[in-house]
Image: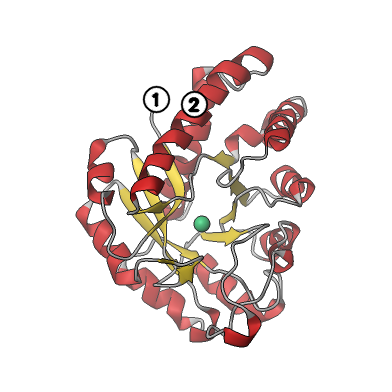
Amino acid sequence: MKYIDAHAHLVHDHQGFHELADSGVYDEIWLMDLDGINLSGIQLATSDEVLAAVKAHPGVVYAYGYLDFSKGVDEIDRLKERGFIGLKPYKPDTHWNDEKFYPFYERAQELNMPMLFHTGMAVRVESYNTRTRNSCGYGPSGMRPSYLAGIGEAFPQLRIIGGHLGYPWFEETVHNLYYCRNIVHDISGYRHYEMLGELFRSLDRAANEGSNRMFHEKLFFATDQFYGLKEENERSLKLKEFWTLFFDLIGSVYHRWGKPEEAEKFFYHNAHNFRLDAESGR
Ligand SMILES: [Zn+2]
Protein backbone atom coordinates (compact mmCIF):
# COMPACT_ATOMS: atom_id res chain seq x y z
CA MET A 1 0.00 0.00 0.00
CA LYS A 2 1.15 3.51 -0.78
CA TYR A 3 0.73 6.42 1.60
CA ILE A 4 0.60 10.19 1.49
CA ASP A 5 0.67 12.33 4.59
CA ALA A 6 -1.35 15.19 3.13
CA HIS A 7 -1.07 17.62 6.05
CA ALA A 8 1.95 17.93 8.31
CA HIS A 9 4.26 20.63 9.62
CA LEU A 10 7.99 21.02 10.14
CA VAL A 11 9.64 22.49 13.22
CA HIS A 12 12.58 24.87 13.36
CA ASP A 13 15.92 23.01 13.53
CA HIS A 14 14.16 19.75 12.80
CA GLN A 15 15.63 16.37 13.79
CA GLY A 16 14.99 13.10 12.03
CA PHE A 17 12.86 14.46 9.24
CA HIS A 18 15.34 13.70 6.45
CA GLU A 19 15.59 10.11 7.65
CA LEU A 20 11.82 9.80 7.73
CA ALA A 21 11.42 11.27 4.25
CA ASP A 22 14.10 8.91 2.91
CA SER A 23 12.68 5.86 4.66
CA GLY A 24 9.85 5.35 2.19
CA VAL A 25 7.15 5.05 4.86
CA TYR A 26 5.40 7.83 2.98
CA ASP A 27 5.38 8.17 -0.77
CA GLU A 28 4.64 11.85 -0.32
CA ILE A 29 4.62 14.27 2.60
CA TRP A 30 2.87 17.61 2.24
CA LEU A 31 4.25 20.22 4.61
CA MET A 32 2.05 23.14 5.60
CA ASP A 33 4.28 26.15 6.09
CA LEU A 34 3.43 28.59 8.88
CA ASP A 35 6.67 30.54 8.51
CA GLY A 36 8.18 30.40 11.95
CA ILE A 37 5.01 30.86 14.00
CA ASN A 38 5.09 29.58 17.58
CA LEU A 39 2.28 27.11 18.30
CA SER A 40 1.80 26.03 21.92
CA GLY A 41 5.47 26.68 22.62
CA ILE A 42 6.71 24.88 19.50
CA GLN A 43 8.76 26.97 17.11
CA LEU A 44 7.85 26.00 13.56
CA ALA A 45 10.22 26.06 10.61
CA THR A 46 10.64 29.20 8.57
CA SER A 47 9.39 29.05 5.01
CA ASP A 48 13.02 28.81 3.85
CA GLU A 49 13.52 25.72 6.01
CA VAL A 50 10.33 24.21 4.58
CA LEU A 51 11.48 24.86 1.01
CA ALA A 52 14.91 23.40 1.80
CA ALA A 53 13.15 20.20 2.88
CA VAL A 54 11.26 20.15 -0.42
CA LYS A 55 14.49 20.57 -2.38
CA ALA A 56 16.20 17.83 -0.38
CA HIS A 57 13.45 15.30 -1.24
CA PRO A 58 12.20 15.96 -4.76
CA GLY A 59 9.07 14.01 -5.63
CA VAL A 60 8.47 13.14 -2.00
CA VAL A 61 8.14 16.36 -0.02
CA TYR A 62 5.81 19.11 -1.24
CA ALA A 63 4.82 22.29 0.55
CA TYR A 64 1.93 24.71 0.85
CA GLY A 65 3.10 28.24 1.62
CA TYR A 66 1.84 30.26 4.55
CA LEU A 67 -0.54 32.86 3.18
CA ASP A 68 -0.43 35.90 5.42
CA PHE A 69 -3.38 38.00 4.21
CA SER A 70 -1.72 41.17 5.49
CA LYS A 71 0.95 40.84 2.79
CA GLY A 72 -1.47 41.41 -0.07
CA VAL A 73 -2.60 39.35 -3.04
CA ASP A 74 0.82 39.46 -4.74
CA GLU A 75 2.13 37.25 -1.96
CA ILE A 76 0.44 34.33 -3.75
CA ASP A 77 2.54 34.92 -6.87
CA ARG A 78 5.66 35.13 -4.75
CA LEU A 79 4.87 31.89 -2.93
CA LYS A 80 4.30 30.08 -6.21
CA GLU A 81 7.52 31.50 -7.62
CA ARG A 82 9.43 30.23 -4.60
CA GLY A 83 8.25 26.67 -5.14
CA PHE A 84 5.15 26.21 -3.01
CA ILE A 85 2.42 24.17 -4.71
CA GLY A 86 -0.48 25.42 -2.59
CA LEU A 87 -1.48 27.88 0.09
CA LYS A 88 -2.08 27.61 3.81
CA PRO A 89 -3.76 30.56 5.52
CA TYR A 90 -4.31 30.36 9.26
CA LYS A 91 -6.66 31.90 11.83
CA PRO A 92 -8.43 34.68 9.93
CA ASP A 93 -9.29 37.79 11.92
CA THR A 94 -12.91 37.43 10.75
CA HIS A 95 -13.92 34.20 8.99
CA TRP A 96 -12.88 32.23 5.92
CA ASN A 97 -15.82 33.36 3.81
CA ASP A 98 -15.32 37.08 4.39
CA GLU A 99 -15.45 38.73 0.94
CA LYS A 100 -12.40 40.83 1.81
CA PHE A 101 -10.42 37.63 1.18
CA TYR A 102 -11.99 36.96 -2.22
CA PRO A 103 -9.23 38.64 -4.25
CA PHE A 104 -6.82 36.13 -2.67
CA TYR A 105 -9.03 33.20 -3.58
CA GLU A 106 -9.45 34.53 -7.09
CA ARG A 107 -5.68 34.71 -7.60
CA ALA A 108 -5.17 31.25 -6.10
CA GLN A 109 -7.75 29.91 -8.53
CA GLU A 110 -6.03 31.60 -11.49
CA LEU A 111 -2.66 30.14 -10.52
CA ASN A 112 -4.01 26.64 -9.77
CA MET A 113 -2.83 26.90 -6.20
CA PRO A 114 -4.97 24.65 -3.97
CA MET A 115 -5.76 26.05 -0.54
CA LEU A 116 -5.79 24.18 2.72
CA PHE A 117 -8.05 25.86 5.26
CA HIS A 118 -7.93 24.79 8.86
CA THR A 119 -11.45 23.90 10.05
CA GLY A 120 -12.74 23.51 13.59
CA MET A 121 -10.87 23.44 16.86
CA ALA A 122 -7.42 25.01 16.95
CA VAL A 123 -4.53 25.29 19.35
CA ARG A 124 -4.10 28.55 21.23
CA VAL A 125 -1.71 31.02 19.70
CA GLU A 126 -1.35 33.93 22.09
CA SER A 127 -3.64 35.93 24.32
CA TYR A 128 -5.25 39.16 23.18
CA ASN A 129 -3.10 41.45 25.29
CA THR A 130 0.17 39.90 24.18
CA ARG A 131 -0.51 39.30 20.54
CA THR A 132 1.90 40.34 17.86
CA ARG A 133 0.18 38.88 14.83
CA ASN A 134 -2.66 41.27 14.20
CA SER A 135 -4.13 39.14 11.44
CA CYS A 136 -4.98 36.31 13.83
CA GLY A 137 -8.45 35.84 15.20
CA TYR A 138 -9.41 33.74 18.20
CA GLY A 139 -11.16 30.43 18.64
CA PRO A 140 -12.51 28.08 16.00
CA SER A 141 -15.72 29.86 14.98
CA GLY A 142 -14.12 31.81 12.12
CA MET A 143 -12.99 28.48 10.73
CA ARG A 144 -16.30 26.63 10.67
CA PRO A 145 -16.34 24.13 7.81
CA SER A 146 -19.45 25.64 6.23
CA TYR A 147 -17.56 28.84 5.42
CA LEU A 148 -15.66 26.81 2.85
CA ALA A 149 -18.88 26.02 1.02
CA GLY A 150 -19.31 29.71 0.21
CA ILE A 151 -15.76 29.97 -1.10
CA GLY A 152 -16.25 26.82 -3.15
CA GLU A 153 -19.39 28.28 -4.70
CA ALA A 154 -17.80 31.65 -5.50
CA PHE A 155 -14.64 30.05 -6.92
CA PRO A 156 -15.70 26.80 -8.58
CA GLN A 157 -12.23 26.08 -9.98
CA LEU A 158 -10.43 26.67 -6.68
CA ARG A 159 -9.30 23.41 -5.11
CA ILE A 160 -10.15 23.49 -1.44
CA ILE A 161 -8.93 21.18 1.31
CA GLY A 162 -10.66 21.44 4.64
CA GLY A 163 -7.94 20.69 7.17
CA HIS A 164 -9.31 18.17 9.69
CA LEU A 165 -12.96 17.31 9.86
CA GLY A 166 -14.15 20.50 11.48
CA TYR A 167 -14.90 19.33 15.02
CA PRO A 168 -17.28 20.37 16.61
CA TRP A 169 -19.12 20.96 13.34
CA PHE A 170 -18.88 17.56 11.74
CA GLU A 171 -22.28 17.95 10.05
CA GLU A 172 -20.94 20.96 8.17
CA THR A 173 -18.05 18.85 6.94
CA VAL A 174 -20.48 16.23 5.73
CA HIS A 175 -22.34 19.00 3.96
CA ASN A 176 -19.14 20.13 2.22
CA LEU A 177 -18.26 16.64 1.10
CA TYR A 178 -21.76 15.96 -0.09
CA TYR A 179 -22.62 19.18 -1.90
CA CYS A 180 -19.39 20.90 -2.85
CA ARG A 181 -17.59 19.41 -5.82
CA ASN A 182 -14.35 21.31 -5.16
CA ILE A 183 -14.00 20.61 -1.44
CA VAL A 184 -12.16 17.67 0.07
CA HIS A 185 -11.13 17.18 3.70
CA ASP A 186 -8.19 15.61 5.45
CA ILE A 187 -8.84 13.50 8.53
CA SER A 188 -5.90 14.69 10.64
CA GLY A 189 -6.49 15.50 14.28
CA TYR A 190 -9.47 13.18 14.27
CA ARG A 191 -9.34 11.00 17.32
CA HIS A 192 -12.76 11.23 18.94
CA TYR A 193 -13.78 7.61 19.06
CA GLU A 194 -17.48 8.31 18.66
CA MET A 195 -16.69 10.44 15.62
CA LEU A 196 -14.78 7.61 13.99
CA GLY A 197 -18.05 5.68 13.87
CA GLU A 198 -19.78 8.76 12.54
CA LEU A 199 -17.15 9.05 9.84
CA PHE A 200 -17.70 5.49 8.66
CA ARG A 201 -21.48 5.90 8.78
CA SER A 202 -21.13 8.95 6.57
CA LEU A 203 -18.99 6.98 4.16
CA ASP A 204 -21.62 4.25 4.02
CA ARG A 205 -24.46 6.71 3.59
CA ALA A 206 -22.68 8.48 0.77
CA ALA A 207 -21.95 5.22 -1.01
CA ASN A 208 -25.64 4.40 -1.08
CA GLU A 209 -26.45 7.61 -2.88
CA GLY A 210 -24.48 7.29 -6.08
CA SER A 211 -20.90 7.18 -7.18
CA ASN A 212 -20.55 10.94 -7.67
CA ARG A 213 -20.99 11.46 -3.97
CA MET A 214 -18.62 8.95 -2.54
CA PHE A 215 -16.83 10.46 0.40
CA HIS A 216 -14.11 7.87 0.19
CA GLU A 217 -12.88 9.71 -2.88
CA LYS A 218 -12.86 13.03 -1.03
CA LEU A 219 -10.96 12.22 2.15
CA PHE A 220 -7.19 12.32 2.57
CA PHE A 221 -5.13 10.55 5.17
CA ALA A 222 -2.97 13.04 7.10
CA THR A 223 -1.20 13.23 10.43
CA ASP A 224 -0.82 16.95 11.19
CA GLN A 225 2.37 16.10 13.08
CA PHE A 226 5.15 18.59 13.73
CA TYR A 227 7.94 16.73 11.99
CA GLY A 228 11.39 17.19 13.39
CA LEU A 229 10.48 16.40 17.00
CA LYS A 230 11.22 12.82 17.98
CA GLU A 231 7.87 12.09 19.59
CA GLU A 232 5.96 13.68 16.70
CA ASN A 233 7.95 11.70 14.11
CA GLU A 234 7.09 8.54 16.03
CA ARG A 235 3.43 9.47 16.45
CA SER A 236 3.11 9.87 12.70
CA LEU A 237 4.08 6.24 12.21
CA LYS A 238 1.63 5.21 14.90
CA LEU A 239 -1.16 7.14 13.21
CA LYS A 240 -0.35 5.50 9.92
CA GLU A 241 -0.53 2.11 11.58
CA PHE A 242 -3.69 2.98 13.50
CA TRP A 243 -5.62 4.08 10.43
CA THR A 244 -4.34 1.14 8.38
CA LEU A 245 -5.56 -1.28 11.04
CA PHE A 246 -8.79 0.66 11.49
CA PHE A 247 -9.61 0.32 7.81
CA ASP A 248 -8.48 -3.28 7.73
CA LEU A 249 -10.06 -4.61 10.91
CA ILE A 250 -13.18 -2.48 11.21
CA GLY A 251 -13.71 -1.06 7.75
CA SER A 252 -13.51 -4.42 6.05
CA VAL A 253 -15.79 -6.21 8.48
CA TYR A 254 -18.65 -3.83 9.09
CA HIS A 255 -18.24 -1.57 6.10
CA ARG A 256 -16.76 -1.79 2.64
CA TRP A 257 -13.92 0.63 3.25
CA GLY A 258 -11.41 -1.93 4.30
CA LYS A 259 -11.07 -3.42 0.84
CA PRO A 260 -7.51 -2.72 -0.27
CA GLU A 261 -8.60 -0.84 -3.40
CA GLU A 262 -10.89 1.38 -1.33
CA ALA A 263 -8.39 1.94 1.45
CA GLU A 264 -5.71 2.91 -1.03
CA LYS A 265 -7.85 5.79 -2.26
CA PHE A 266 -7.95 7.16 1.26
CA PHE A 267 -4.26 6.60 1.97
CA TYR A 268 -2.86 7.55 -1.41
CA HIS A 269 -4.82 8.00 -4.62
CA ASN A 270 -7.19 10.77 -3.57
CA ALA A 271 -4.36 13.07 -2.54
CA HIS A 272 -2.08 11.99 -5.35
CA ASN A 273 -4.69 12.67 -8.04
CA PHE A 274 -5.60 15.95 -6.38
CA ARG A 275 -1.99 17.13 -6.60
CA LEU A 276 -1.57 16.02 -10.21
CA ASP A 277 -4.85 17.67 -11.25
CA ALA A 278 -3.82 20.94 -9.65
CA GLU A 279 -0.38 20.79 -11.26
CA SER A 280 -1.81 20.26 -14.72
CA GLY A 281 -4.63 22.77 -14.18
CA ARG A 282 -7.26 20.17 -15.10
ZN1 LIG B 1 -1.93 21.57 10.70
- Which of the numbered marks, if any, corresponds to residue 155? none
Q: Mark 1 or mark 2: which comes first in sequence? A: 1
Q: Which residue is mark 1?
A: 1
* Dot 1 and dot 2 residues touching (CB under 8 Å): yes
**Mark 1 or 2, which is nearer the eye?**
2
Q: Residue 78 at x, y = what percent?
A: 37, 77
Mark 1 secondary-structure assignment: loop
Determine whether the beta carbon of the residue marked 2 sits less than 8 angstroms from the nearest atom of ligand 1: no
Three-letter residue code for mark 2: Thr
Quick check: 27 above or below 102? above
* Count of numbered circles in the view: 2
Quick check: 133 above or below 202? below
Mark 2 secondary-structure assignment: helix
Location of the N terminus by quadrant is top left
Q: Residue 66 at x, y = what percent?
A: 45, 70
Q: Residue, x 49% and y 44% (percent of image)?
A: 222
Q: Residue 132 at x, y = what percent?
A: 53, 86
Among the 4 quarters of the image, the one containing residue 149: bottom right
Q: Residue, x 35% and y 38% (percent of image)?
A: 26
Three-letter residue code for mark 1: Met
Left or right of residue 136, residue 27 in this image: left
- Which of the numbered marks, if any, corresponds to residue 244? 2
Question: Mark 1 to mark 2: distance in Å?
Answer: 10 Å
Q: Residue, x 28% and y 43% (percent of image)?
A: 20
| 10 vs 40, nearest the viewer | 40
How does the figure colour the protein chain or chains?
A: secondary structure
Near mark 1 (Cα within 10 A), the count class, few <14, some 14-19 or many ≥20, is few
Q: Residue, x 35% and y 53% (percent of image)?
A: 229
Quick check: 69 above or below 86? below
